[in-house]
Amino acid sequence: MKNWIILILTIIAVFLLALLANSIIDRKAEARFAYQPQVEIEGIEPRDSIWGLNFPRQYQSYRKTEDTTFKGLYSTSGFADVLDDQPELVILWAGYGFSKDYNQPRGHSHAITDIQRTARVGSPMIKGEGPMPSTCWTCKSPDVPRLMSELGVTEFYSQKFSDFGSEVINPIGCADCHDPKTMNLTITRPALVEAFEAMGKVIGDASHQEMRSLVCAQCHVEYYFDKTKPGKEDAAYLTFPWKDGLTVENMEAYYDNIDFADWVHPLSRTRMIKAQHPDYEIFSMGVHAKRGVSCADCHMPYKTEGGQKFTDHHIGSPLSNVENSCFVCHREKKEDLVSDVYERQRKIKEGTGYLQKEIAKAHIEAKKAWDLGATEAQMADILTGIRHAQWRWDFSVASHGAAFHAPLETSRIVTTGTGKIQEARIELVRLLASLGHNEPVEMPNFESKEFLQKYIGLDMPSEVQDKQRFIEEVVPLWLKEGKERERTTLPGKKVSER
């Protein structure tokens, strides 16, 4: 009897192993069939539709970045006017383009449309016009590495934004991150390579897992336009301030040492720094990074379709895909995970909301001090306090997901910024009193974006009119010229023609 049981169990085990082997063979055969290349991609091919011929699953999932329906506690993948929601930001960014408009970031497929439509880049009607350099295109399109290859990096940075309107027409895509020959992750933006060199590191030593974050760090970082590089003085050369480290203090000291300012605030006369989006820097200070998790693990999790496992290129908030993004490591209920994220966001938001209002008041109080005859010597420490406080506030809020990526570090940054602005405002009270002003400084209506834009001297109706004309008359010409140029470019060779 015992022998019969062993025999039956052996037969069952062999049968199950045969099924498993057959499944593995079928999957491998399906994989070979699924990823048979249809075209040979040569050089820097900026059109995702061409890459999609070889990688249809990845391409179709990337197309979903067009979706604008996701809504989180404070963020959305659709349109949201941040200035309308938080009007005091108009005061913080007075004299800078962000005071004209600042909207929630949408998905990668909207990158070109959104930069064309923002008032921050102006409304240039012809080439060579407009306030912004060509460097503003750098992170918006795989057409950029193509142009850098054709023209040279410095030459690309040396033009106007309007000069490349018909050249940069494809939104962020495959060629930004992948080598077309090997499909390995690759760095296509020289600023990241140069930042590593400035720190004494070699980016070529990065592991594959590290590269799954570094390709994102090409763009999701703090940066500035360096117009003082030896031999490159005519270029707005894209540079990461990483030489001394990635912390908010490291970069603050870097900017102070070179006396850099993005702009001078017209009310307080403070030399300001605009934090861009230091996502990689803050992420690197959080628990997920310390445990070896990459950006792609959460924002581009693996998925299975038709028996095929591949990376989901629907890049967006992990909260829109908790099952694939979070459940790989976490075993809590979905509702508990989302609630935990929202709790962190609420606490950080409480701190940043208070801090930004204090900074707005400080700018206005500083203007009052100047109006009453304050000297540069009397204002020096106060302006430094405003500069450092707003830099720290901006570093926290400009980073997408900072409240989740590194809540402890973000809280620390907000706390130190709050301390600096409180000290600056106390010094302002003392200075104003010495100048004969012993009452609270009159504040404008912080509840209206439109009122505050007029308060700082913006003519937004004219700006909106100019932008509408630009969108209707210039943008279609850029797109038409770009498409005509691409029609003369072969979309790679068919594999059968090799």
Image (cartoon, rainbow, N blue to C red):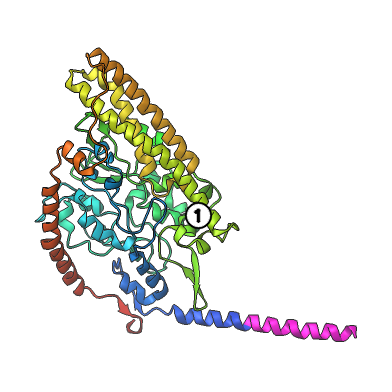
Tell me the amino acid under the disc marked 1. Val
Q: Where does the magenta region start and end?
A: 1-21
Which quadrant of the figure has residue 77?
bottom left
Which quadrant of the figure has residue 169?
bottom left
The residue that label 1 is drawn on is: 338
Left/right placement of residue 289 relative to residue 448 reads right
Tell me what residue is drawn at x 35 percent, y 77 percent: 53
Q: Can you say whether 179 is above or below 28 in the image?
A: above
Q: Can you say whether 32 is above or below 45 in the image?
A: below
Q: Residue 166, image x and y in percent?
A: 17, 63
Q: Nearer the viewer, residue 67 or 131?
A: 67
- What residue occupies the far left of the structure in this picture? 126
Q: Residue 210, image x and y in percent?
A: 48, 54
Task: Report the number of numbered marks.
Answer: 1
Where the N terminus falls, by quadrant?
A: bottom right
Residue 82 visible? The answer is: yes
Q: Can you say whether 92 is above or below 295 in the image?
A: above
Residue 299 visible? The answer is: no
